[in-house]
Image: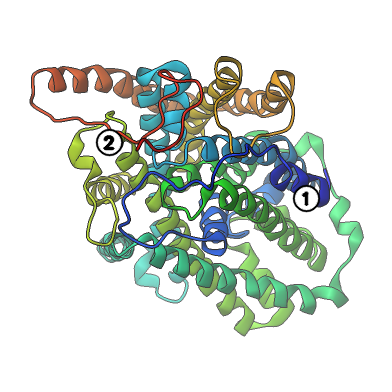
Amino acid sequence: MTSLSLMGWFNGGEYARIEELSSPRENHTRKISVLPLVFLIFYEVSGGPFGVEDTVHAAGPLLALLGFLVFAVIWSVPEALITAEMGTMFPENSGYVVWVSSALGPFWGFQQGWMKWLSGVIDNALYPVLFLDYLKSGIPALGSGVPRTISTWGLTVVLTCLNYRGLTIVGTVAVFLGVFSLLPFVVMGFLSIPDLKPSRWCVANLDDTDWNLYLNTLFWNLNYWDSISTLAGEVENPRRTLPRALFYALILVVLGYFFPLLIGTGAVPLNRELWTDGYFSDIAEIVGGVWLRWWLQAAAAMSNMGMFVAEMSSDSFQLLGMAERGMLPEFFGKRSRYGTPIIGILFSASGVILLSWLSFQEIVAAENFLYCFGMILEFVAFILLRMKHPNASRPYKIPGGIAVAVAICIPPTILIFVVLALSTNKILLISLIAVVIGLVMQPCLKVLEERGWLKFSVRYELQDLHNQDSIPFFVG
C-alpha cells in the first residue's frame, strides 16, 4: 500500500457531517495538537530502532527488512485505522475500554482495561532497565546490585513527576526526545554511503531462523497503536487530529525502523551473533567513530525516557477514563491541578517498580500475550459496533461495509494466534493467572459498590450507544 493511498484511508475516510467536536473533559489544561500527538504515538509504538537488532540475530537481514514492511501492512495499518475510527467515535480517555464495553458489555470492557493496563505497565517496567543498560558501559556500577536498583527506582520517580506536571509538557518533551533520538541515524546514513553493499541485504537462511524471537520482536516493535486512544479526551479536535497524527506517526515509525536496519546491515559485514540489543552503537563507531557511538547511546537512553513518559500517560489516563465510566472507584478520576490523573499515575508507577525484576525477554513475551488477548476483544468490538450501531456518529470512518471491517481484522488475528502459539509454558501460566485476576476483580468491585464501601460514578456527558443509536457526544 503506497503512502498516497494510505493517506487516503486516513484523511479521505468517510467523515460524518456533524459539528466540530470537543472531547468530554474539563478544561484543566491545554489540549495536545498534531505534532506532540505524532511523537506521543511514535513513543507509544516505537521510540526508534533501539531493540530491533534481535530481528537480524533471529532471521538475518532480508527477513528483518521485509518483516518491518510486511508487518506494518498486516498489523500496524489495520490497528491504526481501527484506532482512528473508534477513537474519534469515542473521544474520551477510556479509549479501547469503552469500545469493548459498548459492544460486549461492561464486564468485558473491564477485562479489556485490566489486560491492556497490565501489559502497558509490564512494558513500562522495561524502559528504566534499558536506560541503565545503555549507561553501564560508561558507568559500570549501574550494571548490577544496589546502585542499579536505586537508579531504577530513582529514574521511575523522576519520570513519574514529569507525567504529573501535565500532558502538554510530556508532549513537548516527546517531540524534543524524538528528534534527538533519530538524528544520529540520519548522520550515520550519510556517513555509511561509501560502505554500503546491497548484496548484504539479501542474506537469509530459513533453516537457521528463531521464529519465536523474530515474531515477538517484530510484534513488540509494531504494536500499541491503540494506546493513544486513552488520551483522546485530551486531544484538540480529535475528529481530525487523531487520524492525521496516526498517519504521520505510521510513516515515522516504519521509516525509523527500516532505514537504520538498511544502513546497519549494508554497511558492515554480517555476523548475526553480534546483532543483539545495543549493536547499533557498535555500528555507529565503525561508521563514524567514537563520537557517533556516544551520540547514539545517549539517543537510545533518551528514547527510553520518551517511551516511559508516553506509556505512563496512556496507562494513567486509561484508569481515569475507566473511573469516568463507572468501572473503577471514583477516586481514580481525581485530577491534579495540572489536569493529570493522580491515582492513575501512582498505580502505574507502583506497577513499574514491582515488575522491574523481570528479564527483557520475559517482559516482551508476557506483554505480547496479554496484549494479544486485548486486541482480539478490540477486533470483535470493532466489527460488532459496525453491525449493531451502523448509524452511530463516526467522525472518521474506514471506507467500506461489514465485509471490509472483517477483512481488515483477519490478517492481524492470524498473526495474534501465531504469536500465542509460540509462547512458552512459563509465559502462558503467568498470563493466564493475570487474566484470572481480572475475571475475579470485576465482580469483587461490584460487591464493594453494592455494599457502599467504594463509590462509583459515571460522567453524564459520555456517549451511551445502548440508549440511543446515534447521539451527540455532549448532553446539554
User: Which of marks 1 and 2 precedes in the sequence?
Assistant: 1
Look at 47% across and 36% down and name the residue there: 90
Residue 443 is drawn in which quadrant? Answer: top left
Residue 216: in sight, yes or no?
A: no
Q: Is residue 234 above or below residue 365?
A: below
Q: Is residue 73 left or right of residue 418?
A: right
Relative image position of residue 402 (x, y in whole percent): 69, 19
Q: Mark 2 against mark 1, which lies toward the viewer? A: 2
Relative image position of residue 15 (x, y in whole percent): 65, 39
Dot 1 falls on a residue whose secondary structure is helix
User: Dot 2 corresponds to which residue?
Assistant: 323
- Residue situated in front as seen by the camera: 440 or 171: 171
Q: Residue furthest right?
A: 199
Tell me, for residue 65, which label it has, or none: 1
Where does the N terminus fall, quadrant-wise? Answer: top right
Dot 2 falls on a residue whose secondary structure is helix
Tell me, for residue 209, which label it has, or none: none
Give the residue type that dot 1 points to. Answer: Leu
Q: Residues within 10 Å of mark 1 (few under 14, many from 20)?
A: many
Q: Residues within 10 Å of mark 2 (few under 14, many from 20)?
A: many
Residue 462: in sight, yes or no?
A: yes
Look at 16% across and 17% down and name the residue there: 447
- Residue situated in front as seen by the camera: 346 or 219: 346
Q: Is residue 72 above or below residue 393?
A: below
